[in-house]
Amino acid sequence: MAIGSHRPTRIIVNLDAIKQNIQQEREQLKDNQEIYAVVKANGYGHGAEAVSKAALEAGATGLCVAILDEAIALRKSGIEAPILVLGVTDVRDITLAVNYNIILTVPSLKWLETSLPVLETSQVTLRFHLKLDTGMGRIGVREREELKTLLEVIKASSYLSLEGVFTHFATADSENEDYFNHQVTRFKQLLECFEALPQHVHCANSATAIWHDDLPTTIIRYGIGMYGLNPSGTSLSLPHPLLPALKLETELVHVKQVQEKTSISYGATYSANPGDWIGTLPIGYADGWVRAMQGYIVMIDNQPCEIIGRVCMDQCMVKLPYYLPEGTAVSLINSEVSERISPTAIAEYLGTINYEVLCLLSERIPRVYQ
Ligand SMILES: *Cc1c(COP(=O)(O)O)cnc(C)c1O
């Protein structure tokens, strides 16, 4: 996709905020613990390469991504830190992963058995972490029997290097801890099947790191917290403030005063009031500024301005409080300007979570780093 460097819409990423969020998390670590920065989905929309480099500078010691291509892109950018792919990788791509020194996740006994002939034929050793499904219901080994057989297979093969075992919690951000505790128990039970534990045993995403103590975890897989957002949205409060790292800005590219009952945008759903000043913004749903943003606000000249009429693919219109010249700055996401335009507040308006608001911001918007 062509990046829109010739329009004023841009994402500003404050890498210092990312570093400070990492440093703050480092202060909470126990002796045997380290932070892997989770930079999947282009670093939650912030730009994976820049975020990874900032996080590693701030003391993260590894990276997590979702898919192999994300890991390879980071290697090609010169990053040498350990990279763990959290999702399922096609067994046919194992040698590619090995060539880039990337650590894969083993999701099942079946996957591991399929991988063996590939490893033997190409005479390469797979570095991997084993995933345990303790109640997330996504990927991983669920039963003791499968785990025991799997551990036998690992022991018998010289092509398998088990470096870690991990699980993922479904409800680490919820007030009721019953299901979380059930998963912890299940994790500990499954860990008992190991004769010796691998170097890394981990279970902490941001919510777990922030709200739960005393867990068997050598790695914090730090995602949303590093980007400065509350994993729970607004339901649980943060023990330490985090610094949001991302802002979304644009400028008014067209300003007009319209007559009463003038229609605005597709479907002619908005009918102007007398004297309305209408501003046009060069951002739309193709940028991840979704149609459901209609009726919400952006901030211009410190004033909340309603998004009126339908959001188009590449543009949308706002009602201005008074005449403002073309070129006036518009804040679409900026927690400092107003909490009302924080990713979390926008997510609440859209009926989603802050993660999704960030991930939807498309590649067309340039990322600028400060
Ligand atoms: C995405 C992901 C994380 C990071 O989660 P946050 O809530 O953003 O901290 C950690 N572990 C796994 C397995 C993930 O998929």
Image: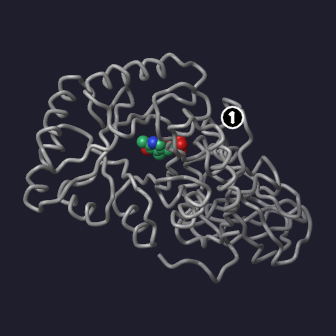
Quadrant in which residue 321 is drawn: bottom right
Q: Residue at x 64, y 68 (%)?
A: 283
Residue 285 shows in this picture: no
Q: Is residue 117 left or right of residue 64?
A: left
Residue 154: give x, y in percent of width and height.
Answer: 17, 39
Q: Residue at x 88, y 59 (%)?
A: 302
Residue 267: give x, y in percent of width and height.
Answer: 62, 61
Against 38, is 283 above or below? below
Against 164, is 197 above or below? above
Quadrant in which residue 352 is drawn: top right
| Three-letter code, disc 1 | Thr
Q: Is residue 56 left or right of residue 6?
A: left
Residue 106: give x, y in percent of width and height.
Answer: 26, 43
Q: Is residue 355 left or right of residue 11?
A: left
Seen from the viewer's position, the closer of residues 78 and 296 is 78
Seen from the viewer's position, the closer of residues 58 and 326 is 58
Seen from the viewer's position, the closer of residues 33 and 189 is 33
Q: Which quadrant: the C terminus?
A: bottom right
Quadrant in which residue 234 is drawn: top right
Q: Is residue 205 left or right of residue 241?
A: left
Per the image, the residue denoted by label 1 is 234
Q: Residue at x 83, y 70 (%)?
A: 258
Q: Residue furthest bottom?
A: 6
Residue 261: give x, y in percent of width and height.
Answer: 80, 62
